[in-house]
Amino acid sequence: MDVPELHPGLEPIAFLLGRWEGAGVGGYPTIESFNFGQEIVFGHNGKPFLTYTSRTWLLDDAGDRVRELATETGYWRQLPDRQLEVCLTHPTGVVEIYVGEVVFHKIELHTDVVARTATAKEYTAGHRLYGLVNGNLMWAYDMGAVGQPIQSHISAELKKVADFVPEAG
């Protein structure tokens, strides 16, 4: 398969490309604290966006997988002047549009729009911070949901385990 050239507008976020794996911690006032594993894949097909998929699973005290947790998929679009738009979809009936900025290897995003289906849990806002630290992808997610104000929910440290793999068309 021919590797498409990276769209030049994506250079500021090209450091995200590849498959990342690692572990993190989570908690919220309405749930017990937990440990989770995660895989994130950022790809591209030569067009002016990155593709994004994240999968998480609950880990037991020994670090073994217990069960699947959350999945999300979407697109990251780099705009002029270091601005960024991210569209995410969740199988739980939530769609989010984030806006933010990339400065060197740090990305800060906040929700501009949150849409939910009639059966989705109440979710009102999100704030995400991503950064490349010593070659690892560190990220944190604050959430406003189920009657709670926006506050820390999950964070993780991921190591790159594979370089970019081209996405289909």
Image (spheres, helix red, strand yellow):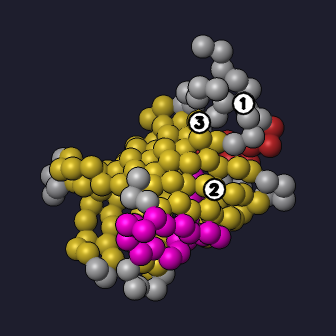
Amino acid type indicated by mark 2: Val
Task: Please identify the dominant SS of the magenta region.
Answer: strand
Residue in the image at 79% along x and 54% along y: 79
Which residues make up the magenta segment?
111-134
Name the quadrant of the N terminus: top right
Q: Amino acid at mark 1?
A: Gly
Q: Residue under circle 3?
A: 43
Upstream in sequence: badge 2 or badge 1? 1
Q: Amino acid at mark 3?
A: Gly
Q: Position of residue 14 (x, y in %)?
A: 67, 42
Marker disc for residue 46: 1
Find numbered disc 2 in the image and state the secondary structure of the residue it sits on.
Answer: strand
Quarter of the figure with residue 44: top right
Q: Give the Cα separation between the discs numbered 2 and 1.
A: 17 Å
Residue 74: within the magenta?
Answer: no
Local crowd size for mark 3, using a 10 Å CA cut-off: few (<14), some (14–19), many (≥20): many
* CB under 8 Å between discs 2 and 3: no
At 59% from the left and 36% from the top, the residue drawn is: 43
Q: Is residue 108 left or right of residue 136?
A: right
Location of mark 2 (residue): 86
Say few, some or many: other residues with alpha carbon within 10 Å of mark 1 (under 14 / 14 to 19 / 20 or more).
some
